[in-house]
Amino acid sequence: MQSLECFEAELTNGKYDGYFNSSFHSNIRDRFLDLIKKYKEIFSANGDVILVSAPGRTEIGGNHTDHQHGCVLAGSVNLDVIAVAAINNENVIRIKSEGYPMDEINLEDLEPDEKEYGCSSAIIRGIAARFRQLGYDIKGFNAYTSSNVLKGSGLSSSAAFEVLVGNILNGLFAKEQVSPVEIAKIGQYAENVYFGKPCGLMDQMASSVGGAVFIDFKNPDEPLIKKIDFDLEKEGYALCIIDTGADHADLTDEYASIPKEMKAVAEYFKKDVLRDVQKNEFLAEIPKLRKLYGDRALLRAYHFLNENERAQKEAEALEKNNFEEFLELVKHSGYSSYMYLQNVNVTGSIAEQAVGVVLSLCEEFLDGKGAYRVHGGGFAGTVQAFVPLDMLDDFRENIEKIVGSGNCHVLSIRPIGGTVIK
């Protein structure tokens, strides 16, 4: 922690430029300088502050596997939420996110409230409550945040915000003793219990830990995390996230139906999650499962059983430097999500199938090269494509003729996760 004036002078003089360029894959100096200016317009410039950053994430492998204690391959990206924060010597948390009203949380009231479901204030309240439950002396603070993580992009701006708030509390009140893994769990707790969304842990974990990571959630309290060397440019590829233009709002029921149906199939085998169900046992019971739960639940369970194994193979392929095998697995992941998981189109939608349209465009413009798949939760949002660098300009131009200029985002894997800037 140090004064705003010190941070402002050091940022202006370029002290952090090397660190930003090597660790963030982008120079965010100007964004922090602008953030400090806006912080001073709303809050007092007196007292020491911290600067914090938390990245968005891309799901590389393991589509809807985390909530069934499966395996995922994910990576933090070079888009993030940043904050300036300082203790305010009150019992109130105030967070002003650029473009949004101020959130104020009274620390005397940290109980979940269904009326607050779906609100950013619920996330803040839940994270503060969990830090208190873990024994940390949380007090009031002021923060101003700004984000360039695309909303509704499948890059999980919500998880980035959760990790940001967790790191603010960690930096101000916990001497940064809370691990990235624990911060991710705290974010998931807030989203499940306070925000009202039954999410898994992948989004928060990828944002918090950073880099490209393989995560095995077989034991969700102690997930196995393995860093993966993943240099796309070295392989001659770019990562593109394509905004399909579909409305990402009001899809909670669609997302919730996936873990609900998977869990129902698992319970048939007297298991809590599909990770504990053997594939041969599942195949043997298909006639009964169809009658009891319907074909969609059956197909979604089938997707999980194969996708969980596929995520492991993707990580192994990257570790063996077999990028062609990795791309083939990514394509099969996309096929499985479309055919079996059925999270490409909103149920019953005929006129609006934006994700399916963009997938067809990727198939056409890549012409057998690279790989593509629905990205993240699905139903709306984005498509992920691995595009050969020698095709990138044409691919981007052709895609954007249809989805709109600026909607094909070329990203890189950021090597660090949520962090307090030092």
Image (cartoon, rainbow, N blue to C red):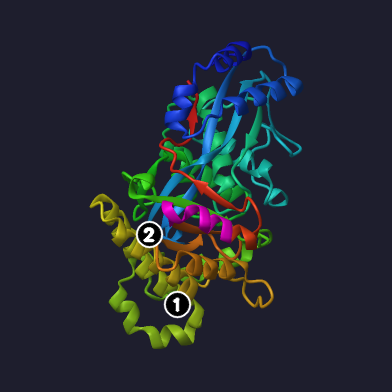
357 horizontally vs 222: left or right: right
Look at the picture and state if 409 lies above or below 23. below
Type of the residue with mark 1: Leu
**Which residues, given as a range, are shown in magenta?**
387-398
SS type, badge 2: loop
Residue 148 image position (x, y, % from top left): 61, 40
The residue furthest left is 320
96 horizontally vs 9: left or right: right
Q: Residue at x 44, y 39 (%)?
A: 414
Q: Which residue is mark 2?
A: 70
Q: Earlier in the sequence, mark 2 or mark 1?
A: 2
Disc 2 crowd rating (10 Å Cα; few below 14, some 14-19, many 20+) is many
Type of the residue with mark 2: Gly
Q: Residue at x 61, y 63 (%)?
A: 380
Residue 368 image position (x, y, % from top left): 40, 68
Closer to us: 181 or 340: 340
Q: Which residue is mark 1?
A: 299
Tell me whether circle 2 and circle 1 mark residues in contact (CB < 8 Å).
no
Residue 214 image position (x, y, % from top left): 34, 50
Q: Is residue 86 magenta?
A: no
Among the 4 quarters of the image, the one containing residue 254: bottom right
Count of number-bearing discs: 2
